[in-house]
Amino acid sequence: MRLYDTARRAVVDFRPGPVVTMYTCGITPYDATHVGHAATYAMYDVLQRRLVDLGHEPRCVRNVTDVDDDILRRARELGVHYLDLAAQETARFRADMEALDMLPVASEPAATSAIHDILGFIGMVLDRGHAYQAAGAVYFAVGTFERFGQVSHLGRGQMLALAAEHGGKPDDPAKRDPLDFVLWQPSAPDEPAWDSMWGPGRPGWHVECSALALRELGTTTVDLHGGGTDLIFPHHECEAAQSEAATGEPFVRHWLHAPMVRYEGTKMSKSLGNLVFVSKLVQEWDPVAVRLALLDHPVHEAWDWHDGLLPAATERLDRWRRAGLGDGALDEVRAALDDDLDLPRALVAIERAAVEGAGIGAAAGLLGVRL
């Protein structure tokens, strides 16, 4: 199998051992699952299915960020407890994943379950001289880590702009460097707080995933780490830096990112009101057709969701079901997936076999499409 690696900026061999450790960044449960989320997890789901097909045991961890700026802000707006909001939206997310027939993950830990682990992790980073305390917070000092930028390969100006866009507060006067990022921060009066040797507060966004990955997977180096391309910087860049600073070992062998999904050419966002929610789609359409529509795109290019996708996917699914079960196109689909998860090529192979009257149940099943 060959896959594109974000950090190496090339398609390279992916040769894991019998057990494949994987970490995919999960949801911040303050709103419903939209097709961008679903497309990301569908891509990693197909990868896991092919790894199982090859005889591997994928061990995938997908976290739930149940405490951070976004969920606390949303809970404040709604006048509800942040954990109640998290529980409600996490349940809806899991129902959406089940409807789309996603493989169960090995674990789905919440950030709030790992406060003890996070505190220990921050202590490791401090002990190794890669962090400092200021104004009641603990910051990671990017200047102490020579490989900062190894994942994103961005220039300093680009990093500063993205840090500001994603709540990194480069203008924080307590920072030694505007790119330094918070590991532990004081809580606002209406926010949850945990005791620590640096004062009461709560974890920063990035540190949660590092602590959970190390705890849940039991290894300092993860075979494959993923998420949407919007997480490359700052989230994954900061994760890599702090993890390697803490352990002294490489954090990730292979970085695989899923492309962004637009709605008819426009970025999907809550403010624009153009989010397409999975829970609504699976009520109105066959969930198998929804899954099929989510897979019908290249895995390294941003793409557009539009209203014609589901009628077309429904027609395709009907053709495939008429073709019935069998091993038609299976070898072609395996070869396509091994060639950097070439989903369009895999779909074309199955479509061709279905039109020719060959049973294609096994090939469709490799994509998680049940006939």
Image: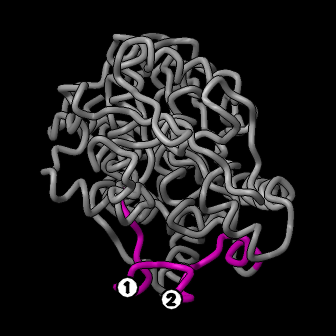
Left or right of 13, for residue 54: right
Q: Quadrant of residue 245?
A: top left
Amino acid type, mark 1? Thr
The image's colouring method is one colour
Residue at the spot of label 2: 272
Quote the CA–CA distance across marks 2 and 1.
9 Å
137 inside magenta stretch: no
Residue at the (81%, 61%) spot, across then down: 85
On the image, the x and y values in percent for residue 292 come to 53, 63
Label at residue 266? 1
* Residue 99 in sight in this render: no
Q: Disc 1 on helix, strand or loop?
A: strand
Q: Which corner quadrant holds the N terminus?
A: top left
Along the line of sight, which residue is nearer the eye, 351 or 188?
A: 188
Instruction: Please give the range of residues in magenta.
Output: 259-283
Residue at the (78%, 56%) spot, across then down: 86
User: Pointers 2 and 1 in contact (CB under 8 A)?
Assistant: yes
On the image, the x and y values in percent for residue 166 come to 42, 61
**Mark 1 surroundings within 10 Å by alpha-carbon count, few (fewer than 14), some (14 through 19), many (20 or more):** few
